[in-house]
Image (tube, rainbow, N blue to C red):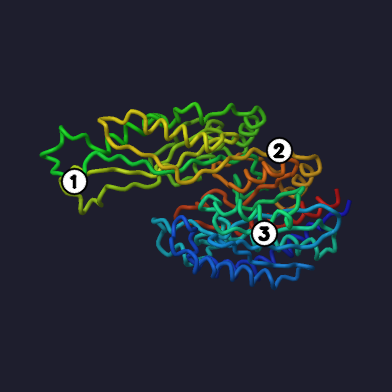
Amino acid sequence: MPTLDAPRTLQSSQRIWEQEIVPALYEYIRIPNKSPAYDARWQQNMDRAVSLIEGWCRRQPVEGLAVEVIRLEGRTPVILMEIPGQGSETVLLYGHLDKQPEMTGWRQGLSPWNPVREGDKLYGRGGADDGYASFASLAALRLVQEQALPHARCIVLIEACEESGSTDLPAYIAHLAPRIGKPSLIVCLDSGCGNYDQLWMTTSLRGLVGGNLRVEILGEGVHSGDASGIVPESFRILRQLLSRIDDEQNGKVKLDAVHVQVPAERLKQARLTAEVLGDEVWNKFPFVPGARPAVTDKVEMILNRSWRPALSITGIEGLPPLESAGSVLRPFTACKISLRIPPRIDPVAATRAVKDALEKDPPYGARVSFEGEKSGIGWDSPPLAQWLSSSVDRASRNYFGKPPMGLGEGGSIPFMGMLGEKFPDAQFLITGVLGPGSNAHGPNEFLHIPTGIRLTACVASVIADHFAR
């Protein structure tokens, strides 16, 4: 079975990254192309990012490459690339180009829209999550073609609203279905890695229920000295309502409707991951001095972030900043809820369960409303075919020097759930460069360049093996 020459592949991947991909990522990071959920005037910056990536891709020496920007009316664009191949099968490679908002807390010398390289790390918003995906996908195909190895027909799909829940993607998938066909291998580069020492495959993803909880008790603010003790405080009512779904003592979600039994294979995987990563399971997060994780058992930490629900409050309204907070009993308090749900949970049913729990029998007759804003289904990987298991093992050992690992991720990639339902017989390679400290969505996001280089070589190797099998 013909395979890639590993030393030559790694050397070529490093050259492409350093000479072509990293300079393009500098320009990409400078564009504040925030996802539409975070920028009502998203179109101009998104078009700049699309134009940058489209231009770079069109210049690539990939035989037969066709690049097209597709725009359905009223929706974010997608970039569709098609590379003809041999045989009757199709490989689909996926990524996105929209970004999370700036976030505060970037350390001195760094900012979201100013690329800064420090050694192996390229700082800036969106480089690792996952602006590199477009460039790495075509680079992987270049590596295969440079060694004159055959590959299947490949489709590269880059969307522009993933960080908004991929709300436009179903329409594009329906529109492009005849052109995409029925892929037998799906490669996604929008995920993470447990460390930077080996190839990591994402074996599951959590789904998401997001929305806004609002509590109103007064028509307008009143003097707190006059009304407190008579008028219930809206923030206290909000706390009571949140306690219906979240145990504030330990963070466990109380709703049975959003729990599943952890599969035995995933439990085994969590134990192995805990053994390999050790304290890196938790100390990769920027705890303040003296702070500690919610649990002490590392296996439980891994399961908590991959197969169990968890509630986060990601925004709040109705509270003035400290410097302008007077002695006023405020008329309302509202918060944005982000509830991660395990794989195999229906997000529509989960949203309904959350809404029912929060709105039922409101304390003091307050006006309570929960409006679901976005939701997405989780994903659980099908068993690896023998050829793919052998391929990723060989790739990880060739380009990282260690065997591959599997890990359930706590985040969401809605597209994977869609594809899992649409193509149940496909094999999946879900991976990425978001490792310890990379901090996607937060301040000081960075891309670990050597991991990008090695990961690109791994993807090339798997694409070559897919055809050769």
Q: Residues within 10 Å of mark 3 (few under 14, many from 20)?
A: many
Q: Secondary structure at mark 2?
A: loop
Taking depth in this image into account, of 394 and 219 the one nearest to the observer is: 219
Whole-percent x, y for residue 430 in the image: 66, 47
Quadrant of residue 58 in the image?
Answer: bottom right
Q: Sequence order check: which comes first, mark 2 or mark 3?
A: 2
Q: Secondary structure at mark 3?
A: helix
Amino acid of disc 3: Ile
Taking depth in this image into account, of 8 and 3 the one nearest to the observer is: 3
**Which residue in the structure is indicated by mark 3?**
453
Amino acid of disc 1: Gly
**Which residue in the structure is indicated by mark 2?**
382
Amino acid of disc 2: Pro
What is the C-alpha distance between the residues marked 2 and 1? 55 Å
Whole-percent x, y for residue 167 in the image: 54, 51
Picture residue at 64% right of the left edge, 61% below the top:
134
Q: Is residue 205 left or right of residue 110?
A: right
On screen, 467 above or below 304?
Answer: below
Whole-percent x, y for residue 182 in the image: 76, 49
Q: Is residue 335 left or right of residue 147?
A: left
**Which residue in the structure is indicated by mark 1?**
221
On screen, 103 above or below 248?
Answer: below
